[in-house]
Image (tube, rainbow, N blue to C red):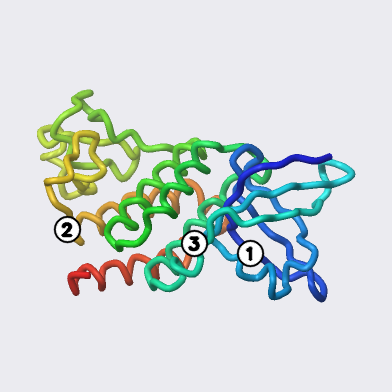
Amino acid sequence: MEWTDEGIILGVRRHGESGAIVELMTRSHGRHLGLVRGGAGSRMRPVLQPGNSVQAIWRARLDEQLGYYLIDATKLRAATLLGASHAAYGVTHLAAIARLLPERDPHDDIYAMLEHILDDFDHPAVAAIHTIRFELAMLAELGVGLDLENCAATGATTDLIYVSPKSGNAVSRSAGEPWRDKLMPLPPFMREAYVAEHGLSDRDLQEGFAITGRFLLRNVLEPRGQQLSEARTGFIGVVMRQLKRGE
């Protein structure tokens, strides 16, 4: 068995004296692991860092085996990403979320989104928006997506300012007013009609993370006996501190 694909490194763990088991999010073969001979050595160590993009050849005698990777770097982002505190946490969190996908199950839209995020992760607020939208995309990919385009009560597509904490559906201002204390605020950047000129506050981001965090925890993580990652908590904390300092 053999295939060649583009991939983004999610994680690496040492194997034996000099090898490394590398976990890639690939464009056409999904989340896929393989052994890299010499992967723990000084030549490959800068390449095998989370967030880097690579060209990978995977080989194995049988499809169900771990197999071996031959890897060449195509874009080395890790040094830049890991040099920023928000990005160091963020990349770890994005990898943790990607691991919720079944191994070897193709998700080309998620791959493309992840690649775009990593190329545009420098500014804390932008990175936060990308991360929230990635979490929304992952919820949809896992079959528990939220409906933020129509009011759950009236079907309206405008003035959507709440989210039902039970259904994950948007609720309009008029329909939600009697139950406003029981609904979650829907920040502008998560609405279909959001315009960038509206501006962005740290409160908007906190509300966005509250929405995706609630449904990730309840619908995906808790049924698997998992919790939201420490990297996510660290990422949110760093982003909020940087925004308050005006960075």
Q: Which mark is residue 131?
A: none
According to the picture, the residue beneath numbered tag 3 turns out to be 77
In the rendered structure, which amino acid carries the disc numbered 2? Ser
In the rendered structure, which amino acid carries the disc numbered 1? Leu
Query: SS class of the residue under badge 2?
Result: loop
Mark 3 and mark 2: span between their CA atoms? 28 Å
Which quadrant of the figure has residue 49?
bottom right
Pointer 3 or 1: first along the chain:
1
Which quadrant of the figure has residue 73?
bottom right
Which quadrant of the figure has residue 40?
bottom right
The location of residue 212, given as percent across then percent down, is 36, 50
Query: SS class of the residue under badge 3?
Result: loop
Q: Which mark is residue 48?
A: 1
According to the picture, the residue beneath numbered tag 2 turns out to be 201
Query: SS class of the residue under badge 1?
Result: loop
Q: Quadrant of the N terminus?
A: top right
Q: Which residue: 33% across, 33% down?
A: 147
Q: Which residue: 52% across, 43% down?
A: 111
Please rate how many residues cluster around mark 3, counting C-alpha atoms within 10 Å: few if below 14, some from 14 to 19, many from 20.
some
For the view shown, which residue lies furthest in the top direction?
Answer: 155
Pointer 1 or 2: first along the chain:
1
